[in-house]
Image: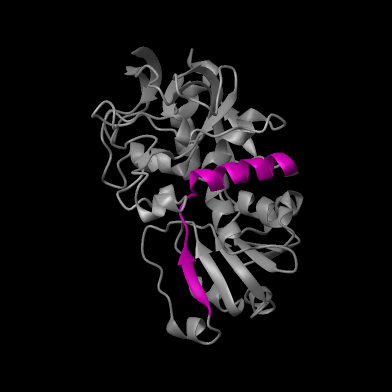
Amino acid sequence: MKATLGYASHAAADKLGPFNFERRDPLPHDVAIEILYCGVCHSDLHQVRNEWHNTIYPCVPGHEIVGRVTKVGAHVTKFKEGDLAAVGCMVDSCRKCPSCDRGLEQYCDVGPVFTYNGPDKHSGAQTFGGYSDSIVVDEAFVLHVPANLDLAAVAPLLCAGITTYSPLHHWKVGKGQKVGIVGLGGLGHMGVKFAHALGAHTVLFTTSPGKAEDAKRLGADEVVVSKNADEMKAHARSFDFILDCVSAQHDINEYLNLLKVDGNITLVGAPEHPLPVAAFPLLMGRRSLSGSGIGGIAETQEMLDFCGQHGITSEIEMINMDYINTAYDRLLKSDVKYRFVIDMKSLK
């Protein structure tokens, strides 16, 4: 066992603070990783504060992990000591069900083992995440990192990146298509970058006119202020695909009316309350509304390779570990462009 230092919460109302625990020694198929950077996801805040009512304490968050391999098990073939490596939202799955057989471990019929607050198959307790100095993961759930990218800015790709890339990939977004991205936050800014890199005519929808310049810098061809009814009406029945990245309450029907016949809108944001959906915007155009989670391991690796080829990373603000509670407060106010990333050497 290896002594490990992390940051944990011990109750929903607690601040995160230093926490000592142990990681297992690498098993034959395991990779031990020194964590260099860990992204801060809004899911971390939800879990720490038990807003999904399933948190097991102590909770060590973090599922956007980039680091360097320090040790490998005897049967590991994909990694060696010194390699760059990454870990995303999952560290295991049943590996036997139809979803896993299709490379869709995120939809494992038994349930994926999440990087934190999941059932640890080895300790019998819960998994602890990337707000820590090291992690040990089966090589089947460890990813290679393109060496040409800024490692800190890679970290959010492990959640925000794959969450937006996966539906764009699934719905075959590409050249000749008109694609909308709703919201320019941690997810939306990655959606804009990916849609642009895939060759689509990319339109950013925002409630804030002040975000137009930044959206165009990130790759948007057009920016529509969604509060402006005339601007919205001008785009009626013109979109092949819309990626909705907003977690606040909003009128989904306005966006359904912007789709062409057979157009699709996919939700990756998760509003607290159900969104009312009218029948006629769906019926009058054979439109579809769908959702998407993260991505499987193979697709996540494909996303990282795509980012390496196109020079895509997340827009980040680097913080030290002891700033995390302030970062959470700022996250609630959407006061970050566009993702916080923890420099884990500040933990030492």
Inspect the magenta stretch and tell me whether residue 225 lies in it.
no
**What sort of colour scheme is used for the picture?**
one colour
125 in relation to 248, above or below = above
Front residue of 39/272: it is 39
| 53 to the left or right of 194 | left
Q: How many marks?
A: 0
Whether residue 301 appears in magenta in the rendering, the answer is yes
The residue lying at 43 percent from left, 23 percent from top is 135
Residue 177 x/y as whole percent: 71, 69
Q: Residue at x 55, y 48 (%)?
A: 299
Q: Residue at x 52, y 64 (%)?
A: 266
Front residue (pair 332, 144): 144
Image coordinates for residue 33, horizontal then vertical, percent: 49, 21
Residue at 40% x, 54% y: name it.
Answer: 99
Residue 307 location (% of width, % of height): 67, 42
Range drawn in magenta: 287-309
Residue 206 visible at all: no
Q: Is residue 183 left or right of residue 296?
A: right
Q: On the rendered image, what quadrant is the N terminus found in? A: top left
- Residue 6 sits in which quadrant? top left
